[in-house]
Amino acid sequence: MAGGILVYALHDDEGNFNKNSLGAISEAARLAGELGSEAAAVVVGEIGDDACAGLGAYGAKRVFRARSAPEGLAQPVVDVMAKVIGDEGFSYALFGGGLLGFEIGAGLTARLNAGVTMEVTAVKVQEGKLIAERPVLQDSAVVDVGYVGEPGIIIGRLNAFDASESAGAQAEVVDVDAQLSEWSTKARMRTRGEQRGADVNIEDAEILIGGGRGLGEKDNFKLAEELAGAMGGAVAATRAVVDAGWYPYAAQIGQTGKTVAPKLYLAVGISGAIQHKVGMQSSENIVAINKDQNAPIFEFCDLGIVGDLHKILPKLTEAIAAKRSG
Amino acid sequence: MKICCLVKEVPDAAVQKRLDSATKRLDRSGEKNLNPFDTHGIEAAMQIREGGVAQVDEIVAVTMGPETAVRALHKAVALGADRSVHLTDAALEGSDVCATGYALAKVLESEQPDLVLLGQQSDDGECYTIGAVVADHLKMPSLTQVIQIDVEEGKLVCERQAEYGYDTVEVDLPAVISVGDAINEPRYPSLKAIMGAKKKPLDTKATADVGIEAGQVGLDGSKTQVLAINPPPQKESGKIIEDEDTNETVEQIIAWLDERKLI
């Protein structure tokens, strides 16, 4: 339908929908309200009628379900969404933040010869069309992006859109028989969602010490752990150090990790790349220790210390322990 | 096996980047460098070659950009590519993601690679998407942000982090893979390689040479328009302490935390 917005609803292997996808559905419903159009969702895999219809609570009027398409890889979803957009005439595709949304949105760009904007933090309506707001150059400016022709593809930044639920509303479930492209079947999931390292809980901690590559080596995480111990907090990590095997995946913050908002986030040796920032910027107080005075984290912290963490952390830990015991 | 590595010339990290208010595009003047993320793609190609499981006949660096982008190609060759291809044409200026992905796919089509490797993002545009756009045009499977590649008969086994943890995915060749920076530590080029880079073959191609339709690229072929550039939401800037006397620094941190009842 003209002005209609189609959202991809990602889910895990148990069928739980992703929070960022639900946020995107709510955002699409809000925008569709302004445009006088419809918000709908696409779901792939064996998801039951009730679960699909339940997306109505977040604002989807219809849910297009492709049972035979696998979840977890982008290209089969591109096939499904391209078909639904073609058959039903949606004007926009909207994705919540996350890796798959980027890949599917990019694939649709090629398939439909469509404009795409990524890392979008807000969407607004101007003269009956959607305009995407996108921060650029390490968030030093925000550009308004409009679309030439249809559809327009909007890929949100992590946590950009909040889910809002109105209990009871049900979506109409429409089964879609989408033919997968030959190349979409040439990537196959062997294992999905493997957890690596110990299971740690960082989401409930009021004080988090975040460790990054600036710690220098795996063993130096003990500096962060000792400080966390002294303060009664937990230790979190950046993706770079998790991928390097220095710290467990369960402690990772950011784009493909967790989102946290503790009372205090104390970042040590973290530069503050956007992918990390999106997972912790809602923290009440942000303190950063980094030896590079040009690190982006100094642009958004509340207290920044330019210095060598290896000198500062042991003394800080000692002083806090002394203060707390005294 | 023939591997094409997509590379890009970007403003040097030390250059203060800005948007040109007239064209609403990134001002790309000043010192430039090879996109650091793409060096991981070249290193991944070198490790496949040296790994011995698959015979790599050729590694070709491919870029699209103005004349100056030749320097990024020289650097890519110094890091291990055997030759390079430079797509350059005034008609390409102002291309958005959709148009750039199409143009790169056309130049890659003329090379018929078995594997296309690239970095997960450019240091300037922060788009993360080009690999998947190129792949769909080439009708190849693709995966982005890959941190481990193992070569098996006719396919790759790739690992990456997605929303729910680590995924292991089999990808049949030919394929387009964008790599994360955790995949490897790129080597430093030897002096000899740097000196020899300019002597390696470099093909310069215009849009017509690779069958790019003029209406599909440049500003006119782009499907997005930057309508306005605005300042970011104002945030009160934080307090910054330069650590000179660590004891004093620690006292200041404690006082700051104490004031906010965080200890």
Image: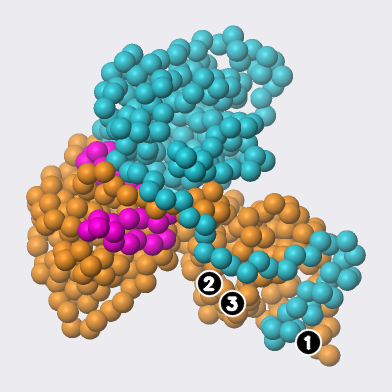
Residue B206 at x, y = what percent?
38, 16
Residue A122 at x, y = what percent?
38, 62
Residue A280 at x, y = what percent?
54, 67
Badge 1 element? helix
Reply above or below: A196 against B65: below
Query: Who's the residue at 81% across and 88% down the image?
Result: A325
Find disc 3 in the rendering and name its residue.
A284
Query: Who's the residue at 29% across and 40% down the image?
Result: B223
Task: Between residue A16 and residue A286, name the one nearer to us.
Answer: A286
Contact (Cβ within 8 Å) of mark 3 with mark 1: no
Specify the farthest residue to the front.
B22
Reply above or below: A272 against B158: below
How many residues crowd around disc 1 within 10 Å: few (fewer than 14), some, or many (20 or more)? few
Task: Between residue B185 and residue B86, name the one nearer to us.
Answer: B86
Specify the farthest residue to the bottom.
A326
Judging from the image, the colouring scheme is: by chain
Query: Who's the residue at 51% across and 20% down the image?
Result: B67
How many residues crowd around disc 3 within 10 Å: few (fewer than 14), some, or many (20 or more)? few
Badge 3 element? loop
Q: How far apart are marks 1 and 2 (CA)?
A: 27 Å
Q: Which amino acid does label 2 sit on?
A: Ser
Find disc 2 in the rendering and name its residue.
A282
Chain A pictured colour: orange
Reply above or below: B249 against A139: below
Identify the mark nearer the N-term, 3 or 1: 3
**Where, quadrant-wise, is the N terminus of chain B in this rendering?**
top left
Find disc 1 in the rendering and name its residue.
A324
Chain B pictured colour: cyan
**Chain on which label 2 sits:** A
Reply above or below: B93 against A181: above
Residue A186 at x, y = what percent?
27, 38
